[in-house]
Image: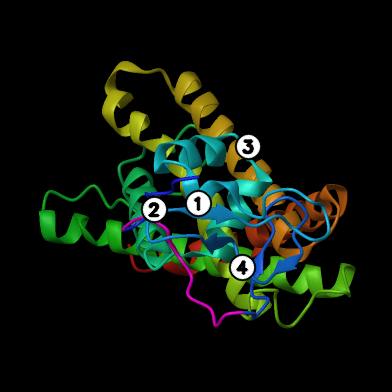
Amino acid sequence: MKLSLPLQGYFDLLNHPPGAKKFICINCGRPVSGLYRQISSTVLKIIDCDKCKKPADKYIEFEVLIILIDLILLSKPAYRHILYNSDCKNLWKIGCILILLEAYCFWTDAFRGITSITYRSHLNDPFLSEKGFYLSTVHFVAGFLLLYGFIYLFTSVLHRTVPTITGNGKTYPHMLLHGVILASIGKFLFIPIIIWRENSTETGMAIHIVLVLMYFVISLVQIHSVVSDCARSRSCVIVILAFIVKAYFLTRVSGLLQQFV
């Protein structure tokens, strides 16, 4: 089988010493010593997992577009491939872009259909009114940190078999952080709100926002189940609890930020 490794520049495969079981089978989640065997300079053969007897990672021969489609479809194997077998150096950049996107939507009142909180001072001075954008950014940074922190806390309490070191040698908090960022990719669907906001009703915008947030929650449940190696039902309870507690504390944070408007 000829493989061109089309992930070069997008999701490069991790480099591990030969024999070290730090790759993960994308089907069963168990450690494997490698993903492919070099037969010649141009031919590679995908290695089968010893446990499930399936190809350890079929995505190493797939185009990036196929992987992204499977991500949109909330595929567990696609999540495992990116989180455990790929060297995702740009995930933190994606997280920053998403926070700025949400902050901009919030600052421009695009979320007014689901919340009454605003940091716009409606002043004619552009320098003073711009301050609301920075406050909105602080708001969503705090929200992200609260969500991540409470998911980690509730996972430690409700799922006590969480490994301190994951199969690829990275710590669990590190993988959970990557997972929360990866689950947030669905928030790029907020972009149509910015584009067509003037031609949409508040009800239509509210429905759009709720659907995007529901997709984010479902994606987060799926990724938490992958990273924590627990049942979806338990992941669902942990994620929903984290969202509820995060919303409570975030209202307190927004109250403090209102003083700077």
Extreme-front residue of the structure: 40
Instruction: Give amino acid for label 4.
Output: Gly
Q: Nearer the viewer, mark 3 or mark 2?
A: 2
**SS class, disc 2:** loop
Q: In the drawing, what numbered circle is on residue 7?
A: 2
* Crowding near the residue tagged with mark 3, few <14, some 14–19, many ≥20 C-alpha atoms within 10 Å: few
Residue indicated by mark 1: 60
Q: Position of residue 128 (x, y in %)?
A: 17, 60
Which residue is pictured at 43% across the width and 48% down the height? 3
Three-letter amino acid code of the residue under disc 1: Ile
Q: Secondary structure at mark 4?
A: loop
Question: Do the CB atoms of the residues marked 4 and 3 lie less than 8 Å apart?
Answer: no
Question: Which region of the structure is painted magenta?
Answer: 9-18
Q: Does dot 3 land on a helix, a strand or a loop?
A: helix
Residue at label 3?
214
Asked which quadrant contains residue 198, the reply is top left
Looking at the image, which is closer to me, 259 or 130? Answer: 130
**First in sequence: mark 3 vs mark 2:** 2
Disc with the residue nearer the chain's start (3 vs 1): 1
Q: Which tag is nearer the camera, tag 4 or tag 3?
A: 4
Residue 260 visible in the displayed image: yes
Q: CA distance from mark 1 to mark 2?
A: 7 Å
Question: How far apart, in angstroms, are the residues tagged by discs 4 and 2?
Answer: 17 Å
| Quarter of the image where the C terminus is located | bottom left
Q: Is residue 15 magenta?
A: yes
Q: Is residue 199 left or right of residue 239?
A: left
- Percent across and percent down for residue 19 are 64, 79
